[in-house]
Amino acid sequence: MIKMDRIKKALSFFDQLSPKDQGELQRFDLSRLSRRAYKEFWGDMRAQMIPQRLGGSQMLSVLPPSFFSTPDWTTFAAEIKGIQEVLRWPLYHYKVYSAAGYTSRQFFDETEGSAAPGRGDTNMKSIGQLPGNEMQVVVGVHVMPIPALADVTGAATTLPVALRDWYTILGLNCWMEMVVSDKEYIVCGPLWMFPQTWGMWSSQSAIAAGALNAVVPVVHGDPSNRSAFHMDPPIGILPVRPFKIVLRWGVAQTAITAGKLGVILNGWKIRAVL
């Protein structure tokens, strides 16, 4: 029979609890619960280790297995106290890509309140940083092109031009810079290195007047996510730390029609409940 003193030895976070809290936890000792109830409460050893890693006491056994494939979470939690929530959460920001093109385009420098389409463009709460009670653990980075509809579809006898334009926008003399607290964490190009790995994949060819319009979407990366750019190890963006993503081009790459270009920081939000 597993006794409470053995659980204390295995889970060092118990040592941080007050005598009163330790007494409360004795109610969940195996000697007072059925084996089924004990297993449902404590989960497996991975779930038991979560409070030690994150510094909190909330049971997090409902997290998916992928959560535990990351390095020791204390690396990211060193400056956070009282963590209570871990959420699957992508940070994203989309901006207009003008027909004239750019030599640089910075992302995550707007909020959902200041961006014209609001959450249609970004879910940032603060300009260039996270709120004081949140941090982001970035496990993947994606660049998503959204060409103008007029360039993606064409008349029955006209081939769309989006793929031609965006091939050079994403692939010719371009790179990404990820900066957190004035330190570079990514310098890599071309932008094809950061595939979106999702999107529309249909393609039809024009054959004659009156036929279906040609549709050629610009999607880069295998939709199975096997081609995704994984941050290994992940990067932890701490609260109120300045960060930015800048896409750069040696020479501005033009497009027939203005479209949009987005950056997504895929990962986990760690949020203290105030």
Image (spheres, rainbow, N blue to C red):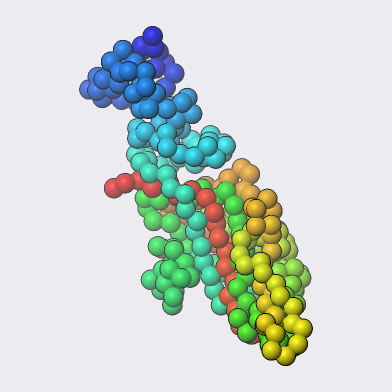
Q: Quadrant of residue 70?
A: top right
**Where residue 79 sits in the image (x, y, percent)?**
43, 42
| Residue 124 position in % (x across, y down) | 44, 63
Q: Nearer the viewer, residue 88 or 70?
A: 88
Q: Please state the horizontal and vertical placement of residue 208, each as a whole percent of the image.
A: 75, 87
Whether residue 184 can be seen here:
no
Point out the residue furthest to the bottom here.
Answer: 209
Residues 126 and 113: in front is 113
Q: Residue at position x 28%, y 15% from top?
A: 32
Residue 184 location, quadrant: bottom right
For image coordinates 61% across by 65% down, the residue present is 199
**Which quadrant: the N terminus?**
top left
Q: Judge from the rendering whether residue 95 lies leftward or rightward of residue 208; answer left or right.
A: left
Q: Is residue 259 visible?
A: yes
Q: Compared to 259, does 241 lie above or below?
A: above
Residue farthest to the left? Answer: 20
